[in-house]
């Protein structure tokens, strides 16, 4: 399966690969695209069963975060990309971090936004997977409002519509990948220059998750934006864009221009 994806920006620029959060599509990164695409070639992808990516077959092999990282690595191979920067929100960040551990020579820089090395007890994720398989997406949509945004955020509907449009099997499969994910023992293996972005009011991955990443990844830095919940890049677009541009300007391309 080739993940649905989109590429924007100058053809000869270094590449930044961006992954969405669970329940959203590659359009989640629209707030950052105008600034990033000035200097970088931006490759965004959809998770299985989200946006334009096909859903996995029901009853198939249980999806893992390693599988998802492998699908992103296949996109790099498709375009002959030897070395990239990676970023992502929530599960997208976990995919990027997994790729940096598995293929350290191919990931020059990381942007980990509202994510974690471990998203909590597996049982809750398996329960959510079972619920959407049985009842569809409606039960999780309204609950996402309070996790994704602070109460004062003006326009959560575009992202909630992404969630409502996700394929239940694809969403459930990604929940199972999250359930099995635990990178806490491998954070020191990440060699990429890493920026961690946290929403000060994020109930899904609270600040202690970001601090665990900060303590575990060598030479990582942390940017906390406020007010912002789990989709901090949507709620505080200017601050997140500025932090990303500053980090990527320093870290990617690597000295000497790097491989593209």
Image (tube, rainbow, N blue to C red):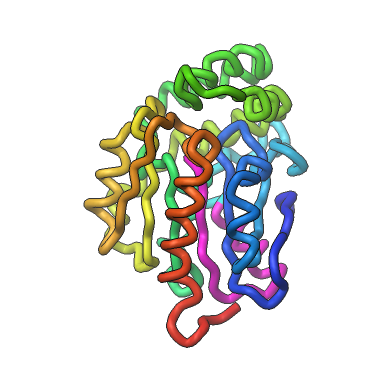
Q: Which residue appears farthest toward the bottom when viewing the image?
A: 256
Residue 243 visible in rendering: yes
Residue 148 is covered by the magenta coloring: no
- As for residue 78 lying within the magenta part, the answer is yes
Please tell me which residue is depicted at 29% across the width and 36% down the height of the picture.
Answer: 207
Q: Which residues are magenta?
A: 69-90
Q: Residue at x 53, y 31 (%)?
A: 175
Q: Is residue 213 left or right of residue 60?
A: left
Q: Position of residue 159 (x, y in %)?
A: 63, 29
Closer to the camera in the image, 153 or 96: 153
Q: Position of residue 199 (x, y in %)?
A: 39, 36
Please give the name of the residue rendered at 37% of the width and 66% of the height, measured from the top-left corner. 193
Q: Report x, y in % for residue 170.
A: 66, 33
The C terminus sits in image quarter: bottom right
For residue 101, what is the image quadrant?
bottom left
Task: Give the side of residue 100 with respect to residue 167, left or right.
Answer: left
């Amino acid at each position: 399966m080739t993940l649905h994806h989109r590429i924007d920006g100058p053809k000869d620029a270094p590449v930044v690969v961006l992954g969405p959060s669970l329940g959203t599509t590659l359009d989640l990164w629209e707030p950052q695209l105008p600034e990033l695409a000035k200097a970088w070639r931006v490759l965004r992808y959809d998770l299985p069963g989200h946006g334009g990516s096909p859903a996995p077959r029901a009853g198939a092999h249980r999806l893992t975060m390693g599988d998802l990282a492998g699908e992103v690595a296949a996109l790099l191979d498709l375009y002959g990309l030897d070395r990239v920067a990676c970023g992502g929100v929530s599960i997208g960040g976990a995919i990027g971090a997994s790729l940096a551990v598995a293929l350290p020579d191919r990931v020059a820089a990381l942007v980990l936004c509202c994510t974690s090395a471990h998203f909590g007890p597996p049982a809750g994720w398996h329960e959510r997977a079972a619920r959407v398989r049985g009842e569809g997406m409606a039960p999780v949509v309204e609950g996402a409002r309070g996790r994704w945004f602070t109460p004062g955020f003006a326009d959560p509907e575009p992202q909630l519509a992404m969630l409502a449009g996700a394929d239940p099997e694809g969403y459930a499969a990604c929940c199972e990948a999250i359930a099995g994910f635990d990178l806490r023992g491998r954070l020191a293996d990440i060699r990429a220059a890493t920026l961690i972005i946290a929403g000060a009011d994020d109930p899904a991955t609270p600040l202690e998750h970001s601090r665990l990443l900060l303590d575990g990844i060598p030479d990582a830095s942390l940017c906390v934006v406020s007010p912002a919940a789990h989709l901090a890049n949507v709620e505080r677009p200017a601050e997140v864009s500025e932090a990303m541009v500053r980090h990527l300007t320093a870290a990617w391309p690597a000295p000497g221009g790097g491989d593209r």
